[in-house]
Amino acid sequence: MTITILTIFPESFESFLQTPVVARAREKGLVTIDIVDIKEYAHGSFRHIDDSPFGGGAGMVMRCQPVLDALREVRSRSDNEPLVVAMTPAGKKYDQKAAHRYADLDHLVLLCGHYEGMDARILDHVDEEVSLGDFILTGGELPAMTITDSIARLLPGALRKASTEDESFEDGLLEYPQYTQPRDYEGEPVPEVLLSGDHGRIRRWRRKESLRLTRERRPDLFEEYIAAGKLTEEDRELLLELEAET
């Protein structure tokens, strides 16, 4: 697949493109990541990409012309009609389902806003708006990196399949706790079951911990999991065990 990122700060992606999973996916030809500098499409010697907002107010707003000219050229060069996604505070919250959906695309375009945002008319030319959450960032570059990383690791061959199957959010639950050496660190031992070699007990313990963590820390996800009818008979048994332990 191809991911094209439109930004006014292309240099911010230099280190990101060398991070292990993203670099591996690129080296294997699983994904092509193109960074497009919006400033290259601004007219005049001053590369005028922003201006003060009509109606007054603090900050600067990204102008239509350079952004939309860049977007038009990207679309014209694409073999397939890309999905264009803008990162905005008003966008739908990004999640693992969206990551899977994007990973199935041939071409995804991520549009990074900046300053006080983009001229609203730019958003008439995008397909979706997404947000990482209810907080404000200086620009869309970090969200674009986050989305790109979440997609790259899902592409077949980027990671071992088992590395992504048991992760948080993949089945609607948080992932179980993980442990490594040493077995005992300053009086805090690894749970005995993980040292037992009994794969059935280990699997059951991990499932139980996933249910416990999700119920305690993300009750919203837990309720969604139940509402979707995903509870298995084993899940119900494990929840009864958890109730008995409290």
Image: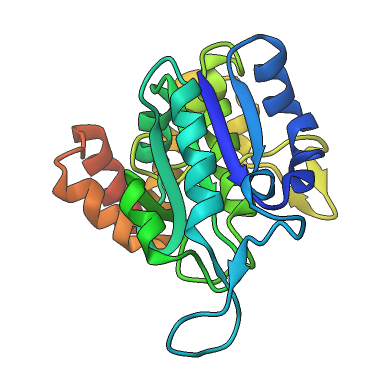
Closer to the camera in the image, 66 or 214: 66
Q: How many marks?
A: 0
Q: Is residue 105 left or right of residue 66?
A: left
Expressed as whole percent of the image width and height from the top left, the position of residue 29 reads 63, 10
Q: Quadrant of the C terminus?
A: bottom left
Q: Is residue 58 left or right of residue 96?
A: right
Q: Please give the name of the residue rendered at 51% of the width and 54% of the height, measured from the top-left corner.
A: 65
Q: Please give the name of the residue rendered at 59% of the width and 73% of the height, measured from the top-left corner.
A: 51
Residue lying furthest front: 44
Expressed as whole percent of the image width and height from the top left, the position of residue 76 reads 45, 25
Q: Quadrant of residue 14?
A: top right
Q: Please give the name of the residue rendered at 85% of the width and 55% of the height, measured from the top-left corner.
A: 186
Q: Is residue 109 above or below residue 12?
A: above
Q: Is residue 140 above or below residue 203?
A: below
Closer to the camera in the image, 101 or 119: 119
Q: Quadrant of residue 213?
A: bottom left
Expressed as whole percent of the image width and height from the top left, the position of residue 219 reads 33, 62
Q: Is residue 21 above or below residue 88?
A: above
Q: Is residue 53 above or below residue 12?
A: below
Expressed as whole percent of the image width and height from the top left, the position of residue 104 reads 39, 22
Q: Please give the name of the residue rendered at 57% of the width and 27% of the height, measured from the top-left corner.
A: 152
Q: Can residue 126 be seen from the camera position used here?
A: yes
Residue lying furthest bottom: 56
